[in-house]
Every structure is written in C-alpha cells, then in structure tokens.
Amino acid sequence: MVDGKTVVCSWEERLVIEMLLLLMLLLVLPCHIVCPMSSINCSIYDDPFPIPHYFYQPGDLLIGGIASQVTYFNNPPSFLEHPSRMVLDEPGSITKNYQHILALAFAVKEVNDNPNFLPNISLGLYILNSYSLGRMTFKATLSLLSAQQKLAPNFSCDNRQKVIAVIGGLLSETSAHMASILNIYKTPQITHGSFSLSKADKQKFQSIYQMVPDDTYQYRGVIKLLHHFRWSWIGLLAIDDDNGNQFLQRILPLLSENSICFAFTYKLPKMTYLKEIAELIVNEAEMYPVLMDRQTNVLFVHGEIPTMMALRISFYLASFTSLPPLSKVWIVTSHWDFESFSFYRITDTDTLHGSLSFTVHSNQPPGFQEFLHTIRPSWAGGDGFIQNFWEQAFSCSLKREQEDMKDTCSGEEKLESLPGTLFEMQMTGYSYNVYNAVHAVAHALHNIRTHESKCIKHVEGGRLDVLNIQPWQLHNFLRRIYFNNSVRETIQFDQDRELVSVFDLTNWVTLSNGSFARVKVGQLDPQAPSGKELTLVEDKIVWHKSFNQVLPVSVCNDPCQPGFSKTKKEGRKFCCYDCTPCPEGMFSGQKDMDACVKCPDDHYSSDGHHECLPKISTYLSYKEALGIILVTLAVSCFLVTTLVLGIFMKYKNTPIVKANNRSLTYILLVSLLLCFLSSLLFIGEPGKVTCLLRQTTFGLIFCVALSTILAKTITVVLAFMATKPGSHMRRWVGKKLAHSIVLSGSFIQAVTCIIWVYISPPFPQMDMHSQPKTIILECNEGSAAMFYSILGYLGFLASVSFTVAFLARKLPGSFNEAKFITFSMLVFCSVWFSFIPSYLSSKGKFMVAVEIFSILSSGAGLLGCIFFPKCYIILLRPEMNIREQIIRAI
C-alpha cells in the first residue's frame, strides 16, 4: 500500500522484495558465530523463528527436501511486521501431498536396507515446508544448507551433517525460489514437479535436474488430442502470473499452426493470498457466463494445484445459487491434481467428472503399500508433519485436551479409508518422481564410491571418501546417471538435465462419495517417432454425464457435411466458416474439408457431390434403338439401290437407259450403294481403322457420285448443243469426256484424302469433358481444316452440278434428266447446308447420328430424284420407253 493505493508487483519485483525481507530477518537474528582458526568448532545460536514443520532423520549424508504439505492463508507481504509472523489462523494441510514426504522416507529406507548399496554409509533426510510462499521457501532453502534448526549457511561445522542434494519443489514458483539459492552453492536440486525453463535459464541454473519433461511436450500432446477428437473451438484458462502468460505465449501459436481456435482466454487469480481467493469467489458471476458458452465444450486449463482447488470451491458455491452446473471437458496439464483441504472435502468434484490430463508417469514400487500401512502418528520421532496431517485428514485431534469439538484420534485410523482427494494409497506421479530422485542421488553416490575421480581425495584402502564429498562434486555423476529402478524402469537424464520419461493420459472419474478414480487411457511419449507420440484407448474414456457417453463436440459452427467445403466468414476466426456446395465435377468426401477436390477425368461427382462415380463410356452402338434405326435405313437404302441397279441392268437396251449414258448410270448407282454402306462405318465403338476410313471413304465415294452427276449434266448439255446444225460440239460428246470428268473430279478428292491421312490422320479418342457423366468414345478428325476441305469440295461439286442442271432444265423432254438432277442437287445441298450447324451443336453419338442421317438422306435424295422417274417409266409405262416416243418428243 503506497499513498493509499495498492501496488501490483511483478514476479521479479516480488522475488526481490521477499529476498530483502529475508535479508532483514537474517540481519536482526541474534546469532553469534565463533569459529576459531585452530579448529572448525562453531557455536551457532538457534533460529528465533524456526520453521515449525519439518522431518529430520539422521544419517551420514542428508538428502534435503522442500515440501508443500502445509500452508497458511495469509496476506500479501508487508514491511510493517516480521515476515515469519505474517500468517493468519491455523495452518491448513494439503493432506494429499503428505505422500511425497512418505515417498522420500520410503526411498531412503529402501537404500539403507540394501546391504549391497552404499555399505557402511547411511542416508538421512531433512525436509522443510515451503508454505507455498516465496519468503518462506528462501528461508527453508537456507535452513537446509545450515545446521538443523540453525541459520548459518556456508559454514562447515564438525557437528553438522551435510545436505548433498535437495528434492523440490512441487510448484513452479517454489522451484524458482529454491534455484535462486541452491544455484549459488551449486547444490543439486531435483525438481519433482513441473517447472519450465527457457534455454537461457537452463544455462544459468546448472544445478537443476527436472523429473518432469518440459511443458512443451504436454502442449503438443494436447494439440494431438484436440486433433484426434476434432475439437477446434476451445476455451483457455491460465493463472494470472508470469507462468500463465508464458503458457499463453507458447500455446497460442501452436493452436494457430494446427488450425485450432480459442473462443476466449480467462485469467484466473493466483491463489496465494486470502484476498485472491475472495476475488475469485466474488468474480464467479463474471466467470460463469464466459465458461457457459454452448459452442465451447472443451476447456484447456493451465493452473497449478492452489488455483484448481479454488476453482472447485467456486463450483461448489455455484451449486447454492441460480447458476447452472458446468458440463464441459476439462483438459489440464500435469501441474494439476485432485486434492483438497480437509475442511472442504465435500466440495464439487462432479463438474470435473470426465476430465483429461497429462499426468506425470507413475508406477508402484514393491513394498510401498505395506510401508503406508505401517504409518501411525507415532511411527517416527522426526516426522513433524504427521500430526498436522493426521488431525486434518481424519478430522480429529491427537491432543487429549482439545478446545474445539473434534473427536480424539485413536491413532489407529486407516489411510485407505480416506477419499482420494485427501490421500491416495497408490503412488502418484509426483511421489514416484521423489522416489526416483532419491535413488538417482543414491546411485550417483554409489558410483562415486566404486569409480575413481580426481575431484575427490582418496583415503586408506584406495576407496573414495564419499563422506567428504561436496555437493557440487555430485553433478558430474548425476548427469550421467543410468539405472533401472525397482519396477525395472530406466532412469536417466538427457542433455538438458530432464528425465527421459513419458506422460500418462489420465481420465478422471469422480465418485459419489467425493473420491475419484484415475483411469489411464493413453500415453504421451516425447521420444517416440513423429506422429506416434500419442497413443489413445478411446473406448476407456468416460465423458461428463451430460454428454450421455457420446463424444462431445466443440466447434465454432456445425461441421460442413460431405459435398460442401469451408468458406471463411468475414471478421471471424478461421475456425468459424460457412459451408459452400461443391461445384460440378468436384467433391468432398469428408466433413469440414477446406476445399472441394476435382474428380478424376474418368469420374463425375454424385448428385450430393460427396463422392466420385465412374463415368459410363458411350458411343453409337448397334444394340441401341438409334443405332438399329440407322442401320435399318442404311440397309433399306442399299437394297432399294440394288433393286434400281438390277432394273437398269435388266433394261439396259431400252431407249430410256441408253439415252442417259448407261456407264455413268452404273457408276452413280454403285457409288450410291457404297455411300449407304459407308454409313455403317460410323456405327459401333470407334477404332483406329474405322476412324481412319470413316470420313475419307465417305468423302471419296460421294465425290465419285457428285462427279458422275456433273458428268451426266454436262453430257446432257453437250448432247443438246451437238444436235444443232453445224455445231462443233459433236467431237466433245462421248464416253471419254464423261469418264475424264469423273476421274478428274475424284482424283482431286483422293489427293486431298491422302494428304489428310499423311499429315494428321483421324484417330479414336475419349472425350471426358463434353458431358458430365459419360465418356464419349469418338473419332478425332485430326485436322479439322482437312475435314472441312473435303466437305467444301463436295459442296463445290454439288453447286456446279446444280448450276449446270438448272440452266439445262428447259431442254426438250428426251433430255429432261437435267430437271431431275436439279431437284436432286437441291435436296443434296439442303441436307448438307443444314448438316453443318446440326453437326457443330451435337455431342457424342448424336453428332455421329447427324452425319449418318445426312449421308443417307442426301444419297436417298439423289436416288429418288434421278432414278425413280425412270423406274416408273420402265416398270409402269413401258409404252413410253420406245424410240418413236422419244423421237416424237423431239
């Protein structure tokens, strides 16, 4: 309080203040130290304000410990009173943490009972309590470096047993305060709780060994867990201090990189002082609406044990108000544990039912259960924690005359009768770390005893003098420690002095009696190959009761179903999106696809665009109705033409056949026969040969037919002109001219076809894009220019024939074939002029059908207009098929 205003200090400022307070305490101590130069005898006065809770067991070498088992509800630091007196009320016992103390005692007992391990050397222990306060942690750490119940660090007296290593602390802040002292004296500190250090801090604090791997591994494990369950919209809760800020700085980029969004971040007050606990309860009405967000069913919490305990208090108090119960999936890190003070053992545990946490890996050393069964209030004279633990765990008093109304403890109460929030009979992960830390120190000492070292002097017999070892000399052996503990698990540190270990994925199942069960549902192995770090047994997970054992969903909006893709919403985080249907030819086969995927060319998207279906190959087949109709027409035309040819051959000597040039008539009828047959090349599956012959055969045969018609027309005109007296056209009339016209006209088309086949011949291809659901098997014409050149040439011959026949239409009746040719050419040109737009606008087999129909109709037009009138006279009016009738007509 400065000038009536509250000053909020940062972690570093608070650390400086607390060290100053401790320094003031040391300066005012009436401690007189006498160390004559002739001897190492020291007289040290007792500490006037000793730490009341401690556990001391003598031994040749001591292992120190800083416990977090007892705490006070106190006020913030003040310069107005002595630091050791700044506490309120009776101490509260975090009874569950008593197991950490027992694990240390059990491990020391195990080492001392082993005759083959450190023979003739006994280990002792000296454990002090930190009270979760920085200033008390400083004092406890300095006290470990001094004589028991003395305060004179850095003095070596002959009556003082040496602390060679310190195990602690449980909370990050406790570990940091310890490190600031122990690093000065280069005393090994083995932290059994979570404590994240940057690379710079690891270089600075060379005396720290961590039994819990870096928090980054847990964060990556949480990311993999969120991905596994497709949770992309979560809430973040963190302590409002440096550790919480560091957590947010590290987790937010990881979430963004892995396509996970946070709906909100909420800062939880640090539960060190009474004022902060009161603030959390007062702010409960503000916190609940944030946590109640219906879309956010997953909450990731970074909170150490005091904060989580305060949260449970607020959940319990909410049950007496109109606030609805929280039904969420809580994901927590290894900093958290289910534990309670004895006075609120009835607080809410149901809210946290089904929580998931990456807990410190644990196992059960043989004999530990039996060791716990021997624990009684009088089991060891040096245990200064057990009375406080026993009274608060069993809600009784060990004093015969108690002022309160508590029952008297019998001393025979059973630890196994306590709920799990107060004490667990199974060794927890943090206790397992304490157990392994003791054995790591013992193995380092054993290695010192069995190996030579230049840093330690030799004594008689050539053995190393372990009893005179200095703490700083232990580091070289701790870094290289490698052994199997009693449950055959390997204990070793990596290059960063972190234990090579795994995390257990634990599902917390709360019970109606306020206790809980730990269910191991997976494991996180930081050393595993990439992609295999997290193993999960999903069937064993129990969710909160409100989810009815159905996998909870935690997304910003409903997922996009197959057939849709995600589209970003403007002004919202990328996890919030709209769903857009996939366009034609694309699909999405899974939920929440970022983009639709194009179907392969030989597939098409289904109606719902959720899958690709194989396209059906299609072509004009003989088996389908359209193909059958066209084949029937082609055969019918062929048969009619054959009949006409037969009639003309039978009546070849009649005047009407002779008058119209029999040879050209036969050539025209044969070419029409071949034209009708050539249409059959267009029906059936396209092949290399059929594609090569289709257009060239059609173009060449039709060219012969049109050249023959042109020759007949010119012959008619020349024959009429030759009948005039004195005409010089007689020499042109005859078969030679007609045949030369046919040959020359056909030769040009033949040369064009040869060039086409040589340069760019037609070939079969699959058209996969013209129609969405079918693959069109067709013939690619190779060169469109050559194809239209052939058609153009046919059009040219037809136009010339039409023009000549039109000009000769008024010739006398015996030469009246020009009229029939005029009509035939009119039909031919009409068919092929309409063919071009119809052909270009059609696809697949219909385009082929258009061309076949054009071939048949134009051929039929030629056949009908030119030959049917003559067949009528030959068959039905034979009296007109005589020479006299023709001459009379002239």
Image: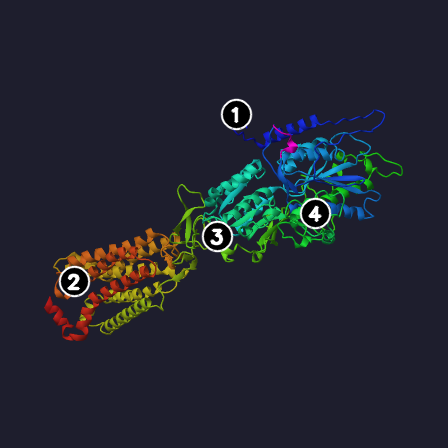
Q: Say what amino acid the circle numbered 3 marks.
A: Val
Q: Is 855 left, or right, of 823 in this rendering?
A: right
Q: Is 700 left, or right, of 589 in this rendering?
A: left
Task: Spot the residue most to the right.
Answer: 461
- Tell me whether circle 1 and circle 2 mark residues in contact (CB < 8 Å): no
Q: Kindly report the distance in space between the C-alpha atoms of the residues bearing marks 3 and 2.
A: 86 Å
- Tell me whether circle 1 and circle 4 mark residues in contact (CB < 8 Å): no
Q: Which residue is mark 4?
A: 398
Which labelled disc corresponds to residue 553?
3
Can the viewer see residue 384?
Answer: yes
Q: Kindly report the distance in space between the C-alpha atoms of the residues bearing marks 3 and 1.
A: 52 Å
- Tell me whether circle 3 and circle 1 mark residues in contact (CB < 8 Å): no
Magenta run includes residue 602:
no
Magenta run includes residue 84:
yes
Q: Which residue is mark 2?
A: 819
Can the viewer see residue 182?
Answer: no
- Ranked by sequence position, the earlier of labels 4 and 3 is 4
Crowding at mark 2 (Cα within 10 Å: few <14, some 14-19, many 20+) = many
Q: Say what amino acid the circle numbered 4 marks.
A: Leu
Disc 1 is placed on an element classified as loop
Depth check, front residue: 735 or 836: 836
- Ranked by sequence position, the earlier of labels 2 and 4 is 4
The mark closer to the camera, 4 or 3, is 4
The mark closer to the camera, 1 or 2, is 1
The part of the chain drawn in magenta is 80-86
Q: Say what amino acid the circle numbered 2 marks.
A: Lys
Q: Is 717 left, or right, of 842 in this rendering?
A: left
Depth check, front residue: 116 or 739: 116
